[in-house]
């Protein structure tokens, strides 16, 4: 194990015990799927199908001719019931295709994506960053010519509390994860392939080491500390190199992909399989917590039903991990490519802080916890006072929204919400990191 991780960070209770031992099982296909045309950062796709049209599993149902985008495929055989809009977990309204799936589904069969170079296949397959970032993967595989990529890093840290979908994927399908990494390594001509895993998943690390044996790929076990899986923190832990302010990882020769993304890339290149489903951890106050293989477009309401329904008093349902995921305003939002978990929290369960704004007591804990060397109390105070220029001067745009500062704040200031506000305002003014 590496001696030390990045500076700052926190150690929230990991809360993974309810699902870490649960093998991935396929969730039933519900009677209705709502598939958003935008499940990625970048240009929103436009639906390419009409109500009443038959669709085949793997058929493109939404696309757009833009570089930073990813097409959307039908996750099932079925019939288009509606083309309209839907609400996403982030609270946005986007175009969506509603599909009535056939009663019987053949999960081993799909419309194959087109062949060619790996980057082209990955694009056709609609693959995006499945750790939550949802950046189109094909763009990362086509870096600007001035960069020489030397290291592909697969991110198996899964540092968010409660989530275990990446853990189970590495444990149950280490060859697919490794194969995806190899494809990227070869496509980019990178010398090294490194898989970073936190020390709280020793079985996954063993499985990956066994799969990697004799291949030259390295498995690095990292200290368990949040947010170890954040891109810049992971690069520092593995390469001992800091990504310069305002630059991409490619500037230091690194490319980071989530392990789920790697497995999807392997399936796309080897099986010509588009991204139609993903593993989602459903946990917290549900009767049957587990790791479910879910067709995209399944509503959170149906997925919670699959997990046995709510148990006890429910206060919040979070999409993703509790440190960074949004609390859902409605359960009628669909599972999308970047949704790694559904976490159901009751009173007192929350790993993440809440939103009662209180005065800052200048204790400095938020600065100690910040892995980006920022002064969160200052950004929060300036944002509260709408002093946007001052938020820029204290580098609000460098915040990775990990939530560590808010987690440790003894007066429970809503620091991340305030920082997000500042970032949105600065971005709208054309300020760049
Ligand atoms: S300021 Fe941003 S990067 Fe720093 S701890 Fe807070 S949320 Fe994380
Ligand atoms: S942790 Fe909270 S109270 Fe302490 S300095 Fe930061 S914002 Fe202020």
Image: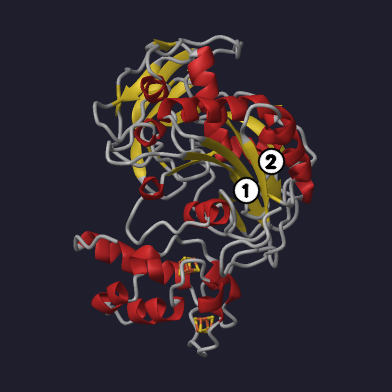
Position in image of residue 212 (x %, y %): 67, 30
> What residue appears at the point 41 percent right and 33 percent down from the top-left corner?
137
Contact flag, marks 2 and 1 (Cβ < 8 Å): yes
Q: Which residue is mark 1?
A: 158
- Foreground pick, 298 / 429: 429
Q: Check disc 1 and report its element: helix, strand or loop.
A: loop
Name the spot of residue 185 as percent of width and height, x first.
Answer: 49, 30
Left or right, residue 123 beside residue 16? left
| Separation (CA) of disc 2 from disc 1 | 7 Å
**In the orientation shown, which residue stands out farthest toward the left?**
429
Location of residue 72 (image quadrant) = top left
State the residue at coordinates (40%, 40%).
135
Q: Position of residue 196 (x, y in %)?
A: 62, 45
Front residue (pair 108, 87): 108
Q: State left or right for residue 258 relative to residue 198.
A: left
Q: Earlier in the sequence, mark 2 or mark 1?
A: 1
* Secondary element at image label 2: helix
In this rendering, the answer to whether 389 lies above or below 58 is below
Specify the farthest residue to the bottom.
Answer: 361
Q: Quadrant of residue 46?
A: top left
Q: Callout 2 environment at 10 Å: few (<14), some (14 to 19), or many (20+)?
A: many
Q: Disc 2 designates what residue?
A: 167
For the point 56% across and 48% down, the residue is: 320
Task: Please report the residue visible at 49 percent of the width from the left and 36 percent of the height from the top.
Answer: 336
């Amino acid at each position: 194990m590496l001696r030390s991780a990045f500076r700052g960070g926190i150690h929230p209770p990991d809360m993974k015990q309810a699902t870490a031992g649960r093998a991935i099982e396929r969730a039933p296909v519900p009677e209705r799927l709502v598939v958003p045309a935008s499940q990625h950062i970048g240009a929103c796709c436009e639906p390419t199908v009409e109500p009443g049209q038959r669709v085949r599993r793997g058929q493109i149902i939404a696309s757009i001719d833009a570089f930073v985008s990813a097409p959307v495929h039908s996750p099932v055989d079925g019939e288009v019931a509606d083309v309209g809009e839907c609400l996403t977990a982030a609270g946005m309204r986007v175009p969506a295709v509603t599909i009535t799936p056939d009663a019987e589904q053949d999960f081993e069969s799909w419309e194959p994506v087109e062949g060619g170079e790996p980057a082209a296949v990955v694009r056709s397959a609609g693959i995006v960053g499945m750790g939550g970032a949802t950046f189109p993967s094909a763009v990362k595989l086509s870096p600007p010519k001035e960069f020489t990529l030397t290291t592909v890093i697969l991110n198996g840290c899964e540092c968010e509390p409660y989530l275990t979908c990446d853990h189970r994927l590495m444990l149950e399908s280490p060859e697919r994860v490794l194969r995806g990494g190899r494809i990227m390594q070869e496509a980019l001509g990178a010398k090294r392939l490194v898989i970073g895993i936190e020390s709280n998943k020793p079985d996954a690390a063993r499985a990956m080491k066994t799969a990697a044996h004799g291949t030259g790929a390295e498995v690095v076990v990292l200290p368990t500390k949040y947010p170890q899986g954040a891109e810049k923190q992971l690069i520092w832990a593995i390469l001992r190199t800091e990504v310069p302010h305002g630059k991409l990882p490619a500037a230091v020769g690194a490319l980071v992909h989530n392990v789920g993304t790697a497995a999807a890339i392997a399936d796309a290149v080897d099986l010509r399989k588009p991204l139609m489903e993903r593993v989602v951890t459903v946990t917290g106050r549900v009767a049957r917590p587990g790791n479910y293989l879910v067709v995209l477009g399944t509503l959170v309401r149906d997925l919670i039903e699959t997990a046995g329904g709510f148990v006890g008093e429910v206060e919040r349902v979070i999409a993703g991990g509790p440190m960074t995921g949004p609390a859902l305003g409605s359960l009628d939002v669909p599972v999308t490519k970047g949704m790694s978990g559904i976490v159901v929290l009751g009173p007192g369960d929350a790993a993440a802080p809440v939103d009662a704004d209180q005065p800052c007591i200048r204790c400095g804990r938020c600065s100690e916890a910040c892995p980006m060397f920022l002064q969160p109390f200052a950004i929060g105070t300036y944002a509260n006072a709408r002093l946007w220029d001052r938020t820029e001067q204290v580098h609000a745009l460098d915040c990775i929204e990990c939530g560590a500062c808010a987690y440790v704040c003894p007066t429970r200031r809503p620091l991340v919400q305030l920082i997000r506000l500042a970032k949105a305002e600065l971005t709208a003014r054309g300020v760049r990191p």
